[in-house]
Image (tube, helix red, strand yellow):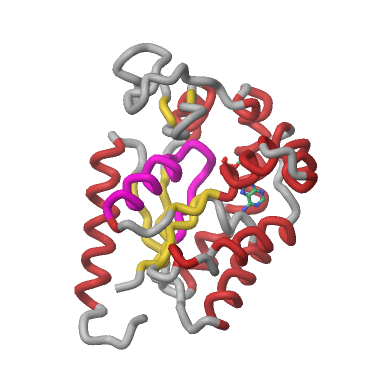
Amino acid sequence: MALRLILLGVPGSGKGTQGRRLHEHYGVPQIATGEMLREAARNGSPLGIKAMELMDQGMLVPDEVVIGIVKQRIQESDATAGFILDGFPRTIPQAEALDGMLAERSTPLDRALYLSAPIDVITLRLTTRMECPVCHRAYNAVEMKPRTEGRCDDDGTQLVGRADDDMEKVKRRIEIYFEETDVLKGYYADSSRLSEVDANRHPAEVFEDLIAILEKDSGSSEGSTKQ
Ligand code: AMP
């Protein structure tokens, strides 16, 4: 069965962490637009460098840029069996463009998973967030501390902070989330594709809930002609 998912939630709600777990569980790629843009900037691409100027201020990158990136990425062969979109869509035009792309291929979205968490928890997670520069696994001082302080559990690399995780930029990103992205809950709820999960818990518990939702979906679609 193909699995096409999006993860919604305020920055810091755990989309990256849950996307990684879902990828490991289902084997479909995690497509994280923020990470793709940071990678493009690291590689010195003009598009990446331009995007990074906005990202560093906590602003959104223009819709046409991210839509183009996602359109190309979901056409790659590893995404034939599905994907987990992490950080896309972030605006209504992006959500509409995604529906358009998927309609063209007759491969509709299966579910939008919304990770909810209180803003004070989110702020603490983001301002203490550290990331492995090699495997991009994220840590924070709340419920995802590394086993050895400052080192990645998987490969021992020295963890680094993200440029857009200082208090002012975190505030800006949360504001933008409420201005531009929160409305997507309604967009997906209206088409009965939204499921909400309480993300103010240990990542393993959140993951269990996500799996339960997806298993239920796959049970109810048994015998259908889903691609
Ligand atoms: P993230 O890693 O998802 O927190 O994204 C980091 C930054 O990348 C965001 O603050 C935006 O500047 C940019 N970005 C990532 N995804 C999108 C998107 N779908 N639309 C616009 N900007 C994005």
Image coords of residue 34 (percent x, y):
59, 44
Image coords of residue 217 (percent x, y):
27, 70
Q: Is residue 40 left or right of residue 102?
A: right
The number of numbered discs placed on residues in the rendered structure image is 0
Residue at point 38%, 22% (across, down): 152
Q: Quarter holding the N terminus?
A: bottom left
Name the foreground residue: 57 vs 48.
Answer: 48
Residue at point 62%, 22% (across, down): 167
Which image quadrant is residue 202 in? top left
Image quarter for ligand 1: top right
Q: Is residue 68 left or right of residue 23?
A: right
Q: Is 136 located above or below residue 47 in the figure?
A: above
Residue at point 45%, 40% (across, down): 13
Name the foreground residue: 180 vs 2.
Answer: 2
Q: Is 71 located above or below residue 221 in the figure?
A: above
Residue 22 drawn in magenta: yes
- Give the magenta part as a residue range: 6-25
Residue 124 drawn in magenta: no
Name the foreground residue: 139 vs 136.
Answer: 136
Q: Quarter holding the C terminus?
A: bottom left
Q: Is residue 144 left or right of residue 9?
A: left
Image coords of residue 161 (percent x, y):
55, 22
Residue at point 62%, 71% (across, down): 96
Q: Is 65 located above or below residue 142 in the figure?
A: below
Residue farthest toward the top in the current orientation of the protein? 149
Name the foreground residue: 41 vs 178.
Answer: 41
